[in-house]
Image: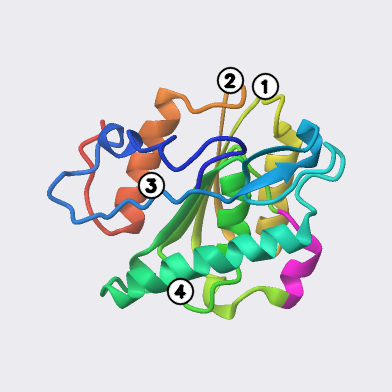
Amino acid sequence: MHGLGADGHDFASLPLQLGVSPDLAVRYVFPHAPVIPVTLNMGMRMRAWYDIVSLDARGQDETGIRRSAASIEDLIAREVDRGVPSSRIVLAGFSQGAAMALFTGLRHAAPLAGILALSGYLPLHESLPAEASAASQQVEILQAHGQHDDVVPYHLGHGSAELLRAAGYDVEWHEYAMAHQVCPEEVQEIGRWLARVLGCETNVS
């Protein structure tokens, strides 16, 4: 899942950079968020998984978050219908997309292979204890964040990881000397992690 104002094409070139064997049967799905007015951006309409009212109220558009989570659940169901077990599905996202990956994945009723959250955070964390799926308790989570991120501050990402660890989740954390972006070292780490959670080897050294 892409970030605010981007679209599903934003990370379409990423699979070729991951170093995962081309012989591995992985389907990469890059959905588009809906086009909605974003309050923080003077009400301009753009692709967003949910509205952002202010930097202080980040991620609290509960209606939008839950609506997008339902659409992501539909995508998971489509893949399951095509013969992919949920335990072979990884939810991944950047920024707002990372928030949606965490929100949706931790509530998904069946086990997932993993959750990948890049430069994001856990929205509506207060509701997680009551809504978390028992199946998600063992899901592997990879979070990565830039130390100089001026869009989603470092403390939001790291704080989310610490919150999840305190709740008993297995969170692998990586941070990089970068802003709100993706760096080559991070891409290599994603490739290693993805190969591991899917039970295959990677040729990334």
Q: CA distance from mark 1 to mark 3?
A: 23 Å
Q: Quadrant of residue 158?
A: top right
Q: Earlier in the sequence, mark 3 or mark 4?
A: 4
- State the residue position of label 2: 177
Residues at marks 1 and 3 touching, judged by CB atoms closer than 8 Å? no
Q: Residues within 10 Å of mark 4 (few under 14, many from 20)?
A: many
Q: Quadrant of residue 16?
A: top left
- The secondary structure making up most of the magenta span is helix
145 lies above or below 148: below
Q: Amino acid at mark 1?
A: His
- State the residue position of label 4: 111
Q: Residues within 10 Å of mark 3 (few under 14, many from 20)?
A: many
Q: Quadrant of residue 86?
A: bottom left
Q: Earlier in the sequence, mark 2 or mark 4?
A: 4
- State the residue position of label 3: 193
- Please indicate whether residue 60 sits to the left or right of residue 21 in the image: right
Q: Earlier in the sequence, mark 1 or mark 4?
A: 4
Q: Image point 62% across, 50% down: which residue?
A: 49
Identify the magenta region: 123-130
- Please indicate whether residue 102 sits to the left or right of residue 56 in the image: left
Residues at marks 2 and 1 touching, judged by CB atoms closer than 8 Å? yes
Q: Is residue 125 magenta?
A: yes
The x, y position of residue 161, in whole percent, is: 66, 49
Q: Secondary structure at mark 3?
A: helix
Q: Secondary structure at mark 1?
A: loop
Q: Amino acid at mark 2?
A: Ala
| Front: mark 1 or 3 | 1
Q: Secondary structure at mark 4?
A: loop
Q: CA distance from mark 2 to mark 1?
A: 7 Å
Q: CA distance from mark 3 to mark 4?
A: 17 Å
Q: CA distance from mark 2 to mark 3?
A: 20 Å
